[in-house]
């Protein structure tokens, strides 16, 4: 009995002191949100008056101080498009191999996962140098949208594989057994049952990769270059939104207005993409009748 | 439900051919019947002959020395306490045991004199030929329609009218057609547990199997849904060869034509007694069986 009453007494004495833990815990998220709000607010404040139809469609003039960002939006779209078109199929194939075909604790899987983790942590400038040496020089694509897109693809591949593999593994064993029990072949179970079930995870991973690709500058300076003209082919150099922001703020005195406008566009783009993700997941839930998603 | 395809006396040969040569058993099963004899006459012909079956999980014995015949058109109830290898036995009948990590199977499981554990057995054909229903209803998280359409399409049936006809036929067979005909394009997970389980049975029936394996098909259901499923299994007598694992003795007695009592003394589950349901329940030969069916041991 006496042993039991000991902690109770200690607790009572603790109650007499003022407890600051709750306000402290609350202050942390408030501070984080405040910093975020300040950043977004400043971007919106500085960039809002720049955003107009002419700004979005016209070519930049006077090193970007005047005119718009039409060609830059086009180059960004092409580079990100190439990046996803290359990375997504490769990532799905690799994840299926790791999650469904190779034994979970095999040496091969361990080695692959370690390599992928290392790749995910490699600074993007290293991917830039690799892209320059491999895609631009060795394969002869030069400073081009193609080189840039492929370099970004190698960069986001580990992120995509990680999240797709996790969501495949999250699909219950039930579903695999149900498929096999109906005489479905393994590839059929993967294509018809597992991948559709894992699609919210695939979408979330894609968005994560897309976000990194859109934000990238270092890897692209070496590969897609920063020519701000409207690209005529995939072998032309092209400048992305992030590189444009970087160039305007670092190299162009008086370029902060268009830089803020471009940044605002980037932020809006990411918000729209996140909204689209939530919308797609809502559709998926309605179609499947699942109340939860199998995202990692 | 029309089951002319099942009344074919030479279907064993047909199916064996299918197992050996054709990846698509479903097509063989739809061949016209020649009408030699009703199902009752074939009662006694074993569909499965299991001989000296031993199963281990990562070295631990799960089943030892199982010998058993499973008869055509009957409902064989597998009873016994938890951990006696009932489900393991069921999984060996269509080689879903292959999917369980660490599971090793020795012995022979003959399906119409074809050893299904022999190399080169077409697992896809085998599993289309022998449907399986699990304890927890496991419809795919998609629409009711796509749940039923998927196995059909996978088995190579492309004709839309044929698919629609089979889906209606199978939903009718499980008594679900009138309940879901207006919501076929809605998620299967929106159905109640009992409806989901009947959907899973219908899904297995779309492939026109010869046999159905059921692993405690009612244990996740309420009493009313259980009654519906039991009635359904009763209707399967003579149409399908059914093997039902259950730990509900009353259920085994109500639905079974044959019973096998499994027991595990620590060296892997083995069969203590098997035979017609009346004999095992009312005049058991083994004392252990008598104590178990009287509910005095569990």
Image (cartoon, rainbow, N blue to C red):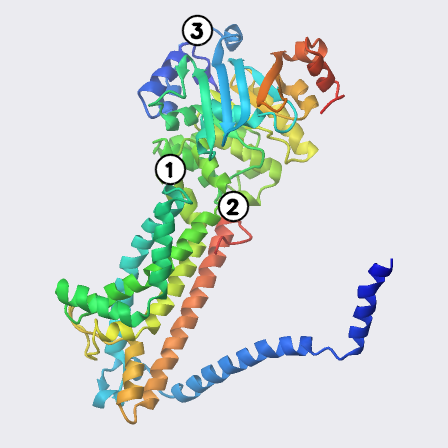
Q: Which dot, 2 or 1, sits closer to the camera?
A: 1
Dot label at residue A186: 1
- Spatial separation of the CA atoms under disc 2 and disc 1: 24 Å
Q: Residue at x 48, y 46 (%)?
A: A171
Q: Residue at x 30, y 58 (%)?
A: A87
* Of marks 3 and 1, the one in the foreground: 1
Of residues A289 and B184, the one drawn nearer to the viewer in this rendering: A289
Q: Where does residue A4 sit, x and y in percent of width and height?
A: 83, 59
CA separation in Å, label 3 and label 1: 38 Å
The residue indicated by pointer 2 is B187
Q: Residue A196, position in %: x, y?
A: 42, 48
Labelled disc at residue B36: 3
* Residue B286, above or below A247: above
Output the chain of dot 3. B
At horizontal 51% and vertical 45% (from top left) the residue drawn is B186
Q: CA distance from mark 3 to mark 2?
A: 42 Å
* In this picture, residue A290 sits left or right of residue B95: right
Rate crowding at label 3 as few (under 14), some (14 to 19) or many (20 or more) other CA atoms within 10 Å. Answer: few
In the picture, the disc for residue B12 is: none
Residue most extreme to the right:
A1
Give the farthest residue toward the bottom.
A254
Q: Are marks 3 and 1 in contact (CB under 8 Å)?
A: no
Q: Percent from the top left, x then y, of residue B93? A: 48, 22
Q: Quadrant of residue B225?
A: top right
Instruction: Judge from the rendering whether residue B39 lies leftward or rightward of residue A142; answer left or right.
Output: right
Marked residue nearer the N-terminal end (3 or 2): 3
Secondary structure of the residue carrying tag 3 is loop
> As drawn, which residue projects farthest toward the front?
A3
């Amino acid at each position: 009995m006496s042993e039991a009453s000991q902690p109770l007494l200690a607790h009572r004495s603790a109650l007499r002191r003022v407890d600051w833990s709750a306000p402290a815990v609350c202050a942390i998220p408030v501070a984080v949100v405040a910093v975020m709000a300040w950043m977004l607010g400043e971007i919106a404040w500085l960039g809002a008056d720049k955003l107009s139809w002419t700004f979005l469609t016209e070519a930049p003039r006077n090193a970007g101080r005047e005119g718009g960002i039409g060609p830059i939006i086009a180059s960004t779209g092409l580079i990100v498009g190439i990046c996803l078109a290359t990375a997504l199929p490769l990532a799905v194939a690799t994840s299926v191999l790791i999650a469904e075909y190779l034994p979970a604790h095999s040496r091969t899987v361990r080695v692959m996962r370690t390599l992928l983790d290392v790749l995910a942590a490699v600074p993007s400038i290293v991917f830039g140098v690799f892209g320059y040496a491999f895609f631009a020089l060795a394969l002869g694509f030069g400073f081009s949208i193609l080189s840039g897109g492929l370099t970004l693809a190698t960069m986001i591949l580990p992120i995509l594989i990680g999240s797709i593999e996790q969501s495949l593994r999250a699909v219950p064993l039930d579903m695999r057994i149900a498929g096999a029990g109906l005489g479905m072949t393994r590839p059929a179970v993967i294509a018809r049952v597992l991948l559709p079930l894992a699609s919210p995870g695939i979408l979330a991973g894609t968005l994560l990769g897309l976000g990194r690709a859109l934000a990238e500058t270092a890897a692209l300076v070496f590969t897609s270059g920063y020519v701000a003209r409207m690209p005529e082919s995939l072998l032309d150099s092209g400048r992305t939104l992030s590189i444009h922001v970087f160039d305007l703020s670092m190299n162009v005195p008086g370029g902060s207005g268009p830089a803020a406008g471009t940044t605002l566009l980037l932020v809006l783009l990411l918000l729209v993409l996140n909204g689209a993700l939530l919308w797609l997941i809502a559709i998926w839930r309605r179609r499947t009748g699942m109340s939860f998603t199998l995202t990692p | 439900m029309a089951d002319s395809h099942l009344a074919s006396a030479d279907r064993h040969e047909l199916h064996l051919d299918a197992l050996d040569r054709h990846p698509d058993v479903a097509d063989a099963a739809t061949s016209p019947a020649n009408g030699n004899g009703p199902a009752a006459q074939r009662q006694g012909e074993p569909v499965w002959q299991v001989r000296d079956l031993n199963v281990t999980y990562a070295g631990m014995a799960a089943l030892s020395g199982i010998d058993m015949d499973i008869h055509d058109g009957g409902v064989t109830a597998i009873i016994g306490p938890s951990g006696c290898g009932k489900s393991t036995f069921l999984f060996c009948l269509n080689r879903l045991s292959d999917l369980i990590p660490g599971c090793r199977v020795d012995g022979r499981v003959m399906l119409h004199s074809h050893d299904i554990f022999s190399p080169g057995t077409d697992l896809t054909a085998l599993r289309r030929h022998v449907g399986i229903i699990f304890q927890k209803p496991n419809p795919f998280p998609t629409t009711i329609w796509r749940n039923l359409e998927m196995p059909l399409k996978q088995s190579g049936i492309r004709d839309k009218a044929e698919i629609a006809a089979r889906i209606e036929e199978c939903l009718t067979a499980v008594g679900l057609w009138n309940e879901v005909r207006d919501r076929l394009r809605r998620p299967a997970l929106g159905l109640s547990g009992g409806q989901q389980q009947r959907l899973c049975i219908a899904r297995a029936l779309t492939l026109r199997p010869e046999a159905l394996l059921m692993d405690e098909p009612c244990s996740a259901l309420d009493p009313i849904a259980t009654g519906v499923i039991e009635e359904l299994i009763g209707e399967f007598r003579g149409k399908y060869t059914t093997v039902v694992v259950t730990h509900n003795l009353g259920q085994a007695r109500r639905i079974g034509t044959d019973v096998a009592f499994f027991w595990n003394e620590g060296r892997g589950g083995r069969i203590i007694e098997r035979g017609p349901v009346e004999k095992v329940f009312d005049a058991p030969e083994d004392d252990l069986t008598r104590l178990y069916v009287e509910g005095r041991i569990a």
